[in-house]
């Protein structure tokens, strides 16, 4: 079950990254800023944290998947 959920998590993270990169690049291309007078000057920087955060999530899920696969090969013994 751990291995299956890790694979699903990686696939989900890759899907979010794929669709959010275009979102960030559009924001960067138009130089999007906050409409609030004292707001953010580079809103695309915050939007760039979406794919970056999901990339870190994918790395963690892959590590969990590797650990689950290793446990499965050893016959389910604890690490």
Image (cartoon, rainbow, N blue to C red):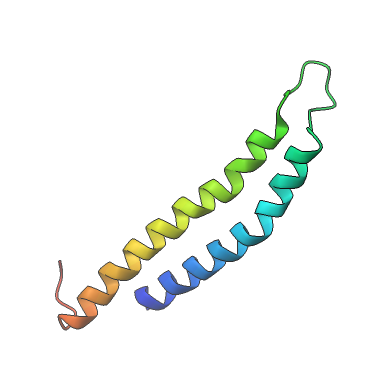
Q: Looking at the image, which residue is at 83% across and 17% down?
A: 37
- Horizontal and vertical percent for residue 13? 54, 62
Looking at the image, residue 34 lies above or below residue 29? above
The answer to whether 4 appears left or right of 33 in the picture is left
The answer to whether 57 appears left or right of 74 in the picture is right
The image quarter containing residue 69 is bottom left
- Horizontal and vertical percent for residue 42? 70, 28
Q: Looking at the image, which residue is at 79% across and 33% down?
A: 32
- Name the outermost residue toward the top: 38
Looking at the image, residue 38 lies above or below residue 33? above
The answer to whether 69 appears left or right of 6 in the picture is left
- Horizontal and vertical percent for residue 26? 77, 46
The image quarter containing residue 60 is bottom left
- Name the outermost residue toward the front: 29
- Horizontal and vertical percent for residue 16? 62, 60
Given residues 22 and 78, the one toward you in this image is 22
Total number of numbered labels? 0
**Quarter containing the C terminus:** bottom left
**Quarter containing the N terminus:** bottom left
Q: Looking at the image, which residue is at 62% across and 42% down?
A: 48
Q: Looking at the image, which residue is at 73% across and 38% down?
A: 28
């Amino acid at each position: 079950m751990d291995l299956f959920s890790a694979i699903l998590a990686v696939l989900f993270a890759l899907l979010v990254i794929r669709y959010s990169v275009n979102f960030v690049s559009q924001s960067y291309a138009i130089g999007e800023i906050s409409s609030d007078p004292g707001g953010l000057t580079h809103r695309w920087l915050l939007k760039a944290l979406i794919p970056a955060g999901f990339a870190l999530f994918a790395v963690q899920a892959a590590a969990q998947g590797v650990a689950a696969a290793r446990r499965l090969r050893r016959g389910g013994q604890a690490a």
